[in-house]
Amino acid sequence: MTTSAPCEAMKLAKEHGEVLGGRVLGQEIRAKVVRLVQAGEVVTLDLDGVLAVSPSFADEVFGKLPAEVGDDAIVFSNVSAQIQEVADMARAGRPGNGSH
């Protein structure tokens, strides 16, 4: 018996462009990931080709999403150092993320 969930890869640059900005786009992606996770998927958010993300987008995707679905349900891949910095700031502002 295997316990690994099917994996869904979302290539964000291909689907949404090189610059990911705005809370609305972040909310749309977060809602899609939540639906996939609820259906039993492990979701990979592939940021290959993404040059920049806005703080509000990062808050939705890097801040709220892991708190909502759990760190085991999502994988972030190809995150540049610059995007990781914005992601870390978004996570730092969330309860239970890095302030212990």
Image (cartoon, helix red, strand yellow):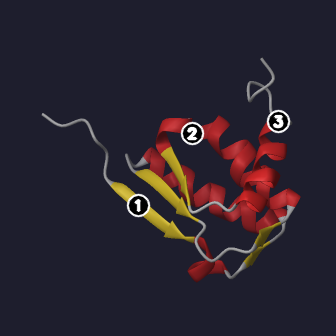
* Amino acid beneath label 1: Glu
Element type at marker 2? helix
Task: Answer left or right for 50 relative to 35.
Answer: right
Residue at image mark 1: 8
Element type at marker 3? helix
* Amino acid beneath label 2: Val
Residue at image mark 3: 92
Query: Relative to residue 85, is residue 15 depicted above or below?
Result: below
Q: Please give the name of the residue rendered at 39% of the width and 50% of the height, measured from the top-left corner.
A: 41
Q: Nearer the viewer, residue 36 or 3?
A: 3
Query: Which-is-in-front pick, marks 2 and 3?
Result: 3
Task: Answer left or right for 42 relative to 97.
Answer: left
Q: Please give the name of the residue rendered at 75% of the width and 28% of the height, measured from the top-left corner.
A: 98
Q: In the drawing, what numbered circle is on residue 69?
A: 2
Alpha-carbon distance for marks 2 and 1? 15 Å
Tell me where residue 67 appears, x and y as whole percent: 66, 35
**Residue extending farthest front:** 81
For label 2, the crowd category at 10 Å Cα-Cα, with few meaning under 14, some 14 to 19 and many 20 or more, is some
Question: If you read the primary sequence from the N terminus, does the residue marked by circle 2 or circle 1 appear first?
Answer: 1
State yes or no: discs 2 and 1 in contact (Cβ < 8 Å).
no
For label 3, the crowd category at 10 Å Cα-Cα, with few meaning under 14, some 14 to 19 and many 20 or more, is some
Question: If you read the primary sequence from the N terminus, does the residue marked by circle 3 or circle 1 appear first?
Answer: 1
Alpha-carbon distance for marks 3 and 1? 27 Å
Q: Nearer the viewer, residue 39 or 65?
A: 65
State yes or no: discs 2 and 3 in contact (Cβ < 8 Å).
no
Query: Which-is-in-front pick, marks 3 and 1?
Result: 3
Task: Answer left or right for 21 relative to 33.
Answer: right
* Amino acid beneath label 3: Ala
Tell me where residue 59 appears, x and y as whole percent: 80, 50
Element type at marker 1? strand
Alpha-carbon distance for marks 2 and 3? 17 Å
Q: Please give the name of the residue rendered at 73% of the width and 53% of the height, measured from the top-left corner.
A: 84
